[in-house]
Amino acid sequence: MTGRIVILSGPSGVGKDTVLAAWTARNPRVRRVVATTTRAPRPGETDGVDYTFVSRERFMALAESGAFLEWKEVHGNLYATPLESLERMLSEGLVAILKIDVQGALTAMEKRPDAVSIFLMPPSMAELERRIRARGSDNAEAIQVRLQNARDEIEVGKRYRHRVVNDDVERCVDRLEAILE
């Protein structure tokens, strides 16, 4: 069985992690490619599970050696999709999920036209704002920045092959499974 690449993006607060957790629980072939980053781990994050955390020097050495499908700088930190993990998953017949922002996704789509690109949409901007506020991790100014970024990302989301509304996690996973069939 041949593996597949799925590029999964969406604005902050749309529920990417929640949907991905439900999808991987339902389908054992679905696995997230663990991204590499230079940012410090957040409380509760595990190296090699949430991200592979490396120094900026190590990251640049990997980038220069061609170890990444794509990489970019976001808010002063570097993020990348490691090629070795991706290729291993594909050779094992898995569905390799690249959970990446729209900037990285456009690069990945260009380099891997065989990838299935899926943009998760909120049911509405009001619901997205409610979800972001419910997290309780951002002040009013940061929420406005996230909402403006979301509007911009949703516009770029039109370039994805599929757009799926996350109105209900299980229904959303049903739609993702249908796309893979």
Image: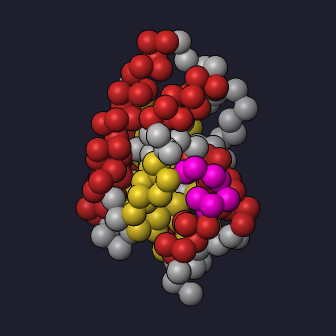
Q: Is residue 61 visible?
A: no
Which quarter of the figure has residue 69?
bottom left
Q: Foreground: 28 or 131?
A: 131
Residue 177: x and y in percent read: 58, 71
Query: In the displayed structure, does residue 171 sit left or right of residue 66?
Result: right
Instruction: Name the residue at 46% across, 68% down.
Output: 5
Q: Foreground: 94 or 159?
A: 159
Q: Is residue 173 visible?
A: yes
Q: Which residues are magenta?
A: 166-173
Instruction: Name the residue at 33% across, 59% down.
Output: 160
Residue 63: x and y in percent read: 36, 47
Which quarter of the figure has residue 145?
top left
Query: In the displayed structure, does residue 64 sit left or right of residue 147?
Result: left
Query: In the displayed structure, does residue 40 sit left or right of residue 9?
Result: right
Q: Foreground: 24 or 181?
A: 181
Instruction: Name the residue at 53% across, 35% down.
Output: 127
Q: Quadrant of the N terminus?
A: bottom right
Instruction: Name the residue at 55% across, 17% down.
Output: 138
The structure's colour scheme is: secondary structure
Above or below residue 168? Residue 176 is below
